[in-house]
């Protein structure tokens, strides 16, 4: 285990220096921290971004779009956007796994901020078939079916409403560390379709996807769309954000990261640790350690807590199996089957490497940096 954070060799690509500090901590200090501005510089950058967003949105009903899950990150972001006088279209993608508390929190945010909310309900039969395809594939990326349709829907709603700016609750303060070996890109539609083609049983007629060309070329360069992470421009502390949400709008905490989704709760706290030995608390707690929100000893104490209360686990497993219309023995067989990796199926990683080479060539010829975060 790292001597500074709590990442360990469950990440097969982890490396340690002579002092026992892992490559994740080193990368945070040498690379990631340069993109984190929890200070006056961040406040200036956020103010400048807001002016650009307002200017781009003149003449339109909305000037930006926010995906609202009901979790702390997106809920807190919604409050900060309101303070700046922006006019977001708020989109919630219901993939069938919302907890009742998530629904209540979303309602509290929208009512307090006076936002327009558009809820996109994913066709359950298609979603179910995709979930089962991923379970049959035996890959760690079981959350891709939810994540992909969430972001794809945001892009599609943005373009249909003439919106250029997507505001994301993703942030460095709580998500700086993540082992790349554990998962592939959620936006990799080639990988998603390959897994579904092999293991799915019904066509995905209405499920929204984004192609490689759309994601890396069409949206950022042709449609001039930009994704901004405002929480990186302010002193974002998760515990303080939860307290402000509770005090301001009656928002209620879930007790664990991503507890707003019943699927993600079971996936992160049972499927991944049991089948792969991946405890996603490690990168999350390590992020809080390197960003100064928690000590390493406090993180270790959190890891000593059980991932699941046994009775709660049985309730969640029973609901999960009924929702997917499988037996408990079928689910147990999925967990016990030999593990596989997403790279055993076609991906868009080869195309991405070609695109990066093309980017480098353009930069050398033009003498300008080409860097658009999509």
Image (cartoon, rainbow, N blue to C red):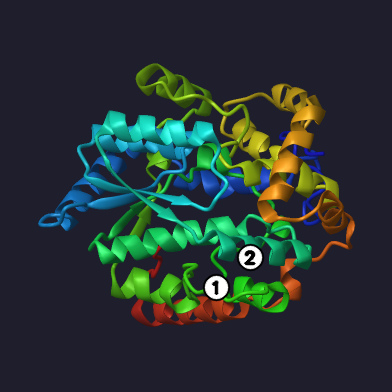
- Answer above or below: position of 202 versus 109: below
Label at residue 130: 2
Q: Which residue is tagged 1? A: 204
Q: Cα distance, mark 2 to mark 1?
A: 8 Å
Q: Quadrant of the N terminus?
A: top right
Residue ID at (41%, 61%): 153
**Circle 2/circle 1 CB separation < 8 Å:** yes
Give the tally of numbered discs.
Answer: 2
Depth check: give the residue in front, 196 or 6.
196
Q: Is residue 224 left or right of residue 3?
A: left
The x, y position of residue 340, in whole percent, is 81, 65
The x, y position of residue 271, in whole percent, is 77, 48
Residue ID at (66%, 50%): 323
Label 1 Cα neighbours within 10 Å, binned few <14 / some 14-19 / many ≥20 = some
Residue 234 visible from this viewpoint:
yes
Residue 16 visible from this viewpoint:
no
- Answer above or below: position of 165 versus 233: below
Secondary structure type for disc 1: loop
Farthest residue toward the top? Answer: 247
Depth check: give the residue in front, 111 or 166.
111
**Figure quadrant of residue 109:** top left
The x, y position of residue 303, in whole percent, is 77, 29
Q: Earlier in the sequence, mark 2 or mark 1?
A: 2
Residue ID at (68%, 73%): 200
């Amino acid at each position: 285990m790292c001597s500074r954070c709590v990442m360990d060799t469950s990440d097969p690509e982890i490396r340690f220096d002579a002092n026992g500090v892992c490559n994740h901590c080193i990368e945070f200090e040498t690379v990631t921290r340069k993109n984190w501005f929890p200070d006056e510089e961040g406040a200036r950058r956020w103010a400048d971004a807001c002016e650009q967003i307002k200017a781009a949105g003149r003449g339109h009903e909305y000037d930006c779009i926010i995906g609202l899950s009901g979790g702390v990150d997106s809920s807190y972001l919604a409050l900060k956007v309101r303070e700046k006088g922006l006019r977001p279209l708020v989109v919630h993608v219901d993939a069938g796994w919302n907890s009742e508390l998530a629904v209540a929190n979303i309602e509290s945010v929208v009512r307090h901020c006076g936002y327009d909310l558009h809820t996109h309900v994913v066709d359950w039969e298609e979603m179910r078939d995709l979930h089962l395809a991923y379970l049959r594939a035996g890959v760690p990326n079981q959350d891709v079916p939810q994540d992909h349709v969430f972001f794809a829907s945001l892009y599609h709603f943005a373009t249909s409403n003439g919106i250029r700016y997507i505001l994301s609750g993703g942030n460095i303060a709580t998500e700086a560390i993540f082992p790349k070996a554990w998962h592939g890109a959620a936006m990799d539609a080639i990988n998603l379709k390959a897994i579904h083609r092999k293991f799915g049983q019904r066509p995905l007629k209405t499920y929204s996807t984004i192609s490689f060309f759309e994601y890396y070329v069409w949206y950022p360069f042709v449609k001039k769309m930009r994704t901004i992470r405002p929480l990186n421009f302010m002193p974002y502390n998760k515990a303080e954000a939860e307290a402000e949400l509770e005090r301001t709008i009656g928002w209620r905490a879930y007790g664990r990261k991503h507890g707003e989704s019943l699927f993600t709760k079971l996936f992160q706290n049972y499927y991944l640790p049991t089948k792969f030995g991946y405890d996603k608390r490690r990168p999350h707690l390590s992020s809080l350690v390197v960003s100064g929100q928690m000590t390493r000893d406090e993180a270790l104490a959190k890891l000593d807590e059980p991932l699941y209360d046994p009775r709660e686990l049985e309730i969640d497993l029973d609901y999960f199996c009924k929702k997917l219309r499988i037996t408990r023995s079928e689910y147990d067989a999925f967990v016990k089957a030999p593990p596989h990796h997403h790279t055993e199926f076609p991906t868009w990683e080869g195309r991405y490497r070609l695109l990066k080479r093309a980017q480098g060539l353009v930069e050398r010829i033009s003498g300008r940096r080409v860097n658009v975060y999509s």
